[in-house]
Image (spheres, rainbow, N blue to C red):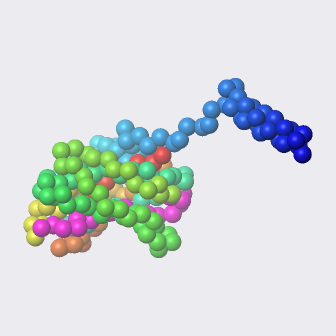
Amino acid sequence: MKTFRTTALVLIAFNFLTGCDPNDPAPPPLPSCTTVNSDFTQLFAATLASNSVFDDYTNMDLLTHEYTFSVATNETVCAVGYQGNAVLFANNIPYTVEIFDNTNNALVYSGSHFFDSAFTDYQSVIPTNLVAGNTYTIRRIVTNYMGNIGTTTGRILRFNGSNPYPVTTNGLTITASDFYGTGGPVTNYGIPYIDIIFQ
């Protein structure tokens, strides 16, 4: 019995020591969630530059701003970026951000987020998988507009005429947009600036 116990202790010690070999390769790094030069930002800029009548407009109102999109490869959403309204931000009123899988008729993400009004503010989301070829709609919803339609305004790429859909950059394709709630709908008027960040 004593020999068995000694052998077992030696094996445990050996496993412990060899399990910490400094020559073992390091585990792979976690995927990054960088907000710099995102696919959406590039798409927004390229579409804006594609037509002289398009403009970067910051006064589009209505409770819900959304666009419909697809991805060419499977992606994981790790953050969203938006520039909030100053009155809502000062009063600590959040937006609801949703991602809806139109292909499977399923809400795949919903979260409550506060967005700074001075700049595009990025907020982490529960990692949300998107399947290549499925269509999705991302929306930001004003949860409490305080009875003032002015608090629902947000930044968009305004088309000022016929829409250019579909627009594509780096495998991100936007096919439609809509604005509604306390008015509307105003369909395909422009692309709301809701940045979607992939790992």
Total numbered labels placed on residues in the image: 0
Q: Is 101 located above or below residue 30 in the figure?
A: below
Q: Residue at x 22, y 44 (%)?
A: 119
165 or 199, nearer to the observer: 199
Is residue 114 in view? Answer: yes
Between 23 and 188, the residue placed more toward the observer is: 23
**At which x and y percent is residue 134?**
51, 63
Lateral position of residue 67 relative to residue 134, left or right: left
The location of residue 101, given as percent across then percent down, is 46, 67
**Relative height, residue 12 to residue 90 (above, below):** above
Looking at the rendering, the stretch of residues picked out in magenta corresponds to 130-146
137 magenta-colored: yes
Picture coordinates of residue 157, whole percent (x, y): 25, 52
Q: Residue at point 32% right, 47% down?
A: 122
User: Viewed as shown, does residue 49 lie left or right of 5?
Assistant: left
User: What is the residue that sits farthest to the top in this orientation?
Assistant: 23
Pick the residue in front: 88 or 189.
88
